[in-house]
Amino acid sequence: MRIFEKKKRDYRFSYENIRTKEKKNKQNK
C-alpha cells in the first residue's frame, strides 16, 4: 500500500513537471 501511494505521488509530481515545462515552452515562443 505504501509503495502504491508513493507511485501515485511520483506520477502526479512528474505530471506537474510536464505541465510547467509546456507552459515555459509556450512562453518562450
Image: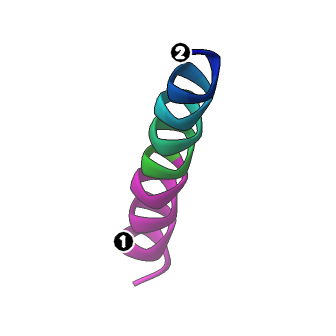
Split into 4 quadrants, where in the image is the C terminus? bottom left
Q: Nearer the viewer, residue 18 or 5?
A: 5
The majority secondary structure of the magenta stretch comes to helix
- Identity, as a three-letter code, of the amino acid under mark 2: Met
Q: Is residue 29 left or right of residue 1?
A: left
| Magenta-span inclusion, residue 15 | no
Q: Nearer the viewer, residue 27 or 5?
A: 5
Q: Position of residue 8 (x, y in %)?
A: 47, 30
The circle drawn on residue 2 is: none
Q: According to the image, label 1 marks what residue?
A: 26
Q: How many marks?
A: 2
Task: Find the residue positioned furthest to the bottom.
Answer: 29
Q: Position of residue 6 (x, y in %)?
A: 62, 28
Q: Mark 2–mark 1 contact, CB under 8 Å? A: no
Q: Residues within 10 Å of mark 2 (few under 14, many from 20)?
A: few
- Identity, as a three-letter code, of the amino acid under mark 1: Lys
Q: Quadrant of residue 7?
A: top right
Secondary structure under tag 1 reads: helix
Q: CA distance from mark 2 to mark 1?
A: 38 Å
In this rendering, the answer to whether 5 lies above or below 11 is above
| Magenta-span inclusion, residue 19 | yes
Q: Residues within 10 Å of mark 1 (few under 14, many from 20)?
A: few
Q: Which residues are magenta?
A: 17-29
Q: According to the image, label 2 marks what residue?
A: 1
Secondary structure under tag 2 reads: loop
Q: Is residue 16 left or right of residue 10?
A: left
